[in-house]
Structures are given as structure tokens and as C-alpha cells.
Amino acid sequence: MSILVIAEHDNAHLSAVTRNAVAAAVAIGGEVHVLVAGSNAQAVADQAAQLASVAKVLLADGPALADGLAENISAQVLALADGYSHILFAATAAGKNVAPRVAAKLDVAQISDIVAVESADTFVRPIYAGNALATVQCGDPKKVLTVRTTAFDPVADHGGSAAVETVAAVADSGLSSFVGRELARSDRPELTAASVVVSGGRGLGSAENFKILDPLADKLGAALGASRAAVDAGYAPNDWQVGQTGKIVAPQLYVAVGISGAIQHLAGMKDSKVIVAINKDAEAPIFGVADYGLVADLFEAVPELAKAL
Amino acid sequence: MKVLVPVKRVVDFNVKVRVKSDHTGVDVANVKMSMNPFDEIAIEEAVRLKEKGAATEVVAISCGVAQCQETLRTALAIGADRGVLVQTDVELQPLAVAKLLAAIARKEAPQLVILGKQAIDDDANQTGQMLAALLDWPQATNASKIDIQGDRAQVTREVDGGLETVSLALPAVITTDLRLNEPRYVTLPNIMKAKKKPMETVSPADLGVDPAPRLKTLKVSEPAARSAGVIVPDVAALVDKLKNEAKVV
């Protein structure tokens, strides 16, 4: 039984989430191969070859694979699917874009966002914004899975010495083309990979006021996040959203500032190791999940906290 | 240009679901059901395309039990022209829904299918992509902007770390993210009008699709509850706890 893990990358760097997906593959058991589908992506393949527990890296390198178009990436995965019992993706925007396409073409179910492996055909996944956990068994011949990365400790990024094998890259589907990308440039750590996250909610009151979180995030080396309410109100960019339909994070420390704690927000952060809530409303549901709650005016408490750290 | 919009009937987003004591599922008896919020955004977008003159007809489709008619009526009240109910009591999983929708798409020959990126009950985020694959159509998931330009659609997508724009040859499948639009409020006159709009009912067998589930749910359980911690009196106490008790700073 061999398992294929689809690497996530930008043609230069292997994304850390791939290490979590490899860890899920290790939990299933079997020989783990990693597919790097990209353009001029030899460096990514070399990084993937260093990962612990990886037996082989497949490099599909071609212009059609440069920008992660779902039509082309899924065709590439399907071209290699024959030899594998399981095909795994990280449950990221990129992974979720491609995995269902692969599953549908194979006429098999896809299992989203697995948080635990019970056996080679049985997995646990959250439903209803994480308010319930379903244990599901898949009878299909191949299992196509996306992996909730926060649920699996990453394999080491060194120590492996897998061989890199070049495979034929697929041609462009002609169905879609890449136009452009606007990625937020930030010196802060990436939200889903950060060990500390400082998030703001509607309590901040404006985009201008959100800046009050900067000194605290600087002190903690934290990524910045936001509740859906704050994003909807235009206080913070879309890709900061933590929650059921935004990012799922599980840092060592999560500081929720002016966030009431709607179910859909809790779904995105309740697996954090330590949760701190700062809110002036003592009845806010966020205090029900916080390890440390501070009932205070955030405009006084946040600068004071930044100074005290 | 014809636009198909699949809509799903789900437990209302305000309801906190409870796991049944026998662990067979969540208790959905007597809870409020609504249209999946992302599908509401999809209907709104399709209706706006029609209002702008880019679309000529908006067809809403729902797959599931007879009560999905109510969800379709909501879609019609927002402004869809007609509804199709694929009625079945079988538990429908994303692959089965995608097959049902693909069968309808082959019959209706739309230029565009717009649907929610995920349903808030199973949180699968699969149906749109599966539908696109089955039809061999291009896809754009998590759309925050849709621009129809002749026989192509330019779509801005929300991705990790920012935005990405792709251009799709029509026909295509687009799934909606939260920021695509804000659905209108449904007015009483439009609810009344919706009652007169045509609605057709078909069965999976009519469409030649076997909707049997592929995944067997062995157990549904509650996640480990997180216990509430302590309320600290001031910032100094908080810093002390973080340093000396939690040891995270």
C-alpha cells in the first residue's frame, strides 16, 4: 500500500502544511510518496526529499503546473493515481480546490478535513463547525482525503533522503488560465503556522483601531487574525478571518481581543493550547473557552499588556 | 445565458446542534432549517447577473427530501425563475449530489453553475469541484468577484494569503465565498410571486443516477469540551499567568 501526498508550494518553497499531511499519511501506514507538481520546482522537490518518512518524491515539472490551476493539477494527480491506495492533500484553499476534482474523476468519495486516522479506511472529521465529530468509513477502493493540518504534528523537515523521480507533466487543459495574484506581504508569521495569534473582533470598532494590536503582535511575534464580524465590517482583510469558513488555527497562544466568541469563530481556534480573551462584556461566550479571561476595556488593556510583556 | 444554482437545505446557522445520545448523528428533529448561507449568496449573484442583463434565466435546484421545496421557494423569492427538486429520502453525499447536478446540467445546458463553496452542515467543500470534474468544465472556488466577459468568466478567488484571479472558458462552475455579495432581504410580495413560479420534481432514477452513500458514518460524537479557565483581575495578573503558569511567553 502506497500513499501519495500532494505537496503545497510556490515553485520555490515547500509549504509547511505538507509536513502535516505527510504526518497523516504516516498515521495511515504505508510507503509515503510526495508529488511536487509545479514549474521550475526542482528546489521544492529537493526540500520534499528531506522530509522524514518520505520514501520517494515525484516531480512533475511543466508550464501548465506553474500556478496551481485545479484543472491541470487534478489531471496530473490522476495520471499518477493508479499506484496508490490513498491520495492526501492539506485542507487548505489549494488542497480543497483540487481534491474533490480528483475524487469525482476516480468515482470515489472524498473525505474532508480529517482530524484523526482510526484505520486505513476509517477517519474522524468535524461537522457542523466542529460541534460534532463524525467517524466515517470509506468502502471505495481509493481514499482521497484532505488533512486538517492543525490535527497532525508535522514530520521533521530534515533527516530524510528520498529519491526524486521525474514524471511526465500534463499539458494545459485549455479550460482556464491564471490572471494574477495579490498576496498580502507581511513580516509577520503566516496565520495558520504561527505559534502565537492575536485576533481582533468587532470590539475594535474600526480598521484604524485595529492597529492597536500591532505592538502586542510585535512583542509576541504573533500573526494577526480577525473574527468574521470584524472582516465583514471592513476592519481587517479577508484572509485574516479565523473560523469555520476562514482559517483554522491551533497556536500555542491565541489572544482574542474584542471578540464575542460566535460558534463559527470558536470552530477556527478552540484547539489552541492557551486562549486569552480580553473583552469588556463579562457575559461574552469567548470567556467560556478562554483559559485566561480579562474583563476590561481593550483600548487600555492591550497597550498595557504590550508594555508589560 | 442560463445559470443553474444548486441550493441546499441545512440546519439554520443560528442553531447549536446537539449530538444524539446514541451517537448516530446530530439531532435535527424540530430545528429550524434554512438555505445554506453560501447558496443564498450564489442565488443573489445569479439574480444580479440577470438584472445586469448578463444572464437570461436562473434555475434553482435542490436535492433531497420533499421539504427542500421550501428552500427552492426561497430561491424563487430572491429572484430565480424556476425550480427543480430532485426528490429522494436517501442520505445524499457530495459525490451523489454532483452526479445529480451533472445530469441536470447536461439536460439544461447552462453556461454557468454557481453554488456555495461549502454547506454549513457537513462542511465538505466538495460539490462544486466534483460537478466541474464530472462535466469536464473549469472551476473557480471561493469567488469574491465574478465578471462575465463574452464567452469567459474572470473570477477573483479568496485563497490563503490573499486573492487570485483566474479566467474560465464558459461553461464553468463557480463556488461562492462570503464577500461576493450581500443577499437581499426577501419581501412579502416576492414570496407571494414565488408561489406561482414553476417547480418541477424529478427522481434520481429519472436522471439515471445511483445516489447511494459511499461513506458510512460509524459514530458521531461531541468534541472534547474546553473548560472555562479563570478570570484574571488585571493585566499584571494576566502576564504572571502567561509567564509562570502557562509558560507561553
Image: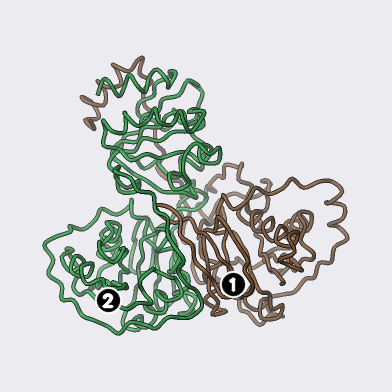
Q: Is residue A236 above or below residue B155?
A: above
Please state the horizontal and vertical placement of residue B150, each as a whole percent of the image: 64, 72
Q: Quadrant of the N terminus of chain B?
A: bottom right
**Residue displayed at 41% across by 25% down:** A278
Please give the chain letter of the residue carrying mark 1. Answer: B
- The one of B138 and A34 positioned closer to us in this rendering: B138
- The one of A133 and A240 positioned closer to us in this rendering: A240
Numbered disc in front, either 2 or 1: 1
Badge 2 vs badge 1, beta-carbon distance below 8 Å: no
Badge 1 element: strand
Measured in 3D between alpha carbons, the distance from the residue under mark 2 to the one under mark 1, in whole angstroms, is 40 Å
Badge 2 element: strand
Q: Which chain is green?
A: A
Please state the horizontal and vertical placement of residue A264, each as a whole percent of the image: 51, 43
Asked if residue B73 lies left or right of residue B91, the reply is right
Please state the horizontal and vertical placement of residue B82, each as a whole percent of the image: 79, 66
Q: Quadrant of the C terminus of chain B?
A: top left
The 10 Å Cα crowd at callout 1, few under 14, some 14 to 19, many 20 or more, is some
Quarter residue A84 falls in: bottom left
Residue hosting label 1: B152
Quarter residue A6 falls in: bottom left
Label for residue A2?
2
- The one of A143 and B125 positioned closer to us in this rendering: B125
Please state the horizontal and vertical placement of residue A193, each as a whole percent of the image: 30, 48
The 10 Å Cα crowd at callout 2, few under 14, some 14 to 19, many 20 or more, is some
**Residue displayed at 57% across by 79% down:** B135
Quarter residue A85 falls in: bottom left
Q: Which chain is brown?
A: B
